[in-house]
Image (cartoon, helix red, strand yellow):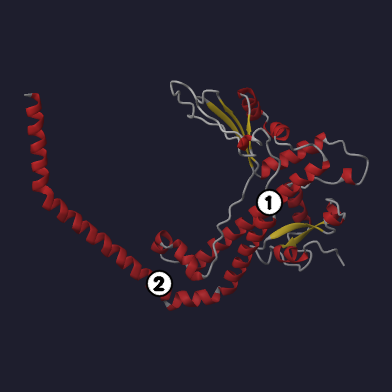
Amino acid sequence: MQYLLVLVVIVTVVSFIVKQLPAVLTLAAITAAIYLTYRTIRHIRMKRYFGSEPFQARKAQLSGVVAEHNDISDYVADIRRTGSFQLGGATTGQHAHLAQFQNTSRHKYKRDRNTADYGATNVHNCSLQVVRNASSDPLKYVMKYFNIKADEQHLARVEDLGRDIGRLEGALANLQRREQEITKSFNPPAFIIKHYADEFMTQVGVTLSPIEVPYPRYVFEYVSAGGNSSQRTVVDMHGQAIDALIEMMAQRIRFRNSAAGQRALMTSSLRNSIKARDGYACRNCSASVAVEPNLLLEIDHIIPVSRGGMSTADNLQTLCWRCNRSKSNKMPA
């Protein structure tokens, strides 16, 4: 009797759906037609906007601004390609690729709920205590377990990392400001920004940079023997963390009483102070933020470090990105 009742209910529901199917299909067809009509009209409006005389005239007026933006976009790619964005590495799994782990449990116990990553040099597999200690004193443990020694050679590498990350951050932020101002100068309809933002930039001629700042990430990871428990501490080396690491390393280094030991630390605060000292203007071509609000400025060694120059205030200068790009490691005249 119970099964018969269930069968009657199923037959009733199916019969109702079949009866209502034409109405449902009609409603779906009407909805689809309305949506396709809306998309078609919106596409036509988009084409008309980009082909209009006001848009083309404004595009011609801003061609120089767009060209400057695209040059900086190329410069960003150069920084990413040639910059130093890696530092240290863990050795706990350096030979893990030579072995193969097999679960030979008779009862097929599940041991892969959490698995340790032995192949990544930025992951240190450790005890739970080390994971917890790293969360309270991250830089100390990054230095200890990722082979970053407190000596002049490693300090210089950390400073190079901070310099290149700072340059890339500044260039990307500069691109974003320029893109916002270009968009504002066109004042496109709201539907263009909402639905055709990338197409708008393409029509204007702006080359969008896909590059992101590759902040080094260090991971302290604990995975239990059975794979049922996993905890980790993650340390991202952004600008603030790099500056703190530079200060910590400098305190640990016993500088000799020499010029090398008396040099300034290349932190973001030092770079900002040099820009302020130089009046936020390029020491080579005199271009300044006062005249060009979006001018990209960078800090450069007058005598390159590779030629024996020191990171002292009198050997540092502010250059615009064009002059810094062309200078490379040339000695001053």
Looking at the rendered structure, the secondary structure element under dot 2 is helix
Which image quadrant is residue 12 in? top left
Residue occupying image coordinates x 9% and y 42%: 16
Earlier residue among tags 2 and 1: 2
**Residue 281, disc:** none
Residue 237: x, y in percent?
Answer: 65, 42
Which image quadrant is residue 150 in? top right
Q: CA distance from mark 2 to mark 1?
A: 39 Å
Amino acid type at image mark 1: Gly
Residue occupying image coordinates x 57% and y 58%: 176
Q: Is residue 100 left or right of residue 81?
A: left
**Residue 49, disc:** 2
Looking at the rendered structure, the secondary structure element under dot 1 is helix
Pointer 1: what residue?
A: 166
Which image quadrant is residue 121 in? top right
Instruction: Give the foreground label among 2 and 1.
Output: 1
Amino acid type at image mark 2: Tyr
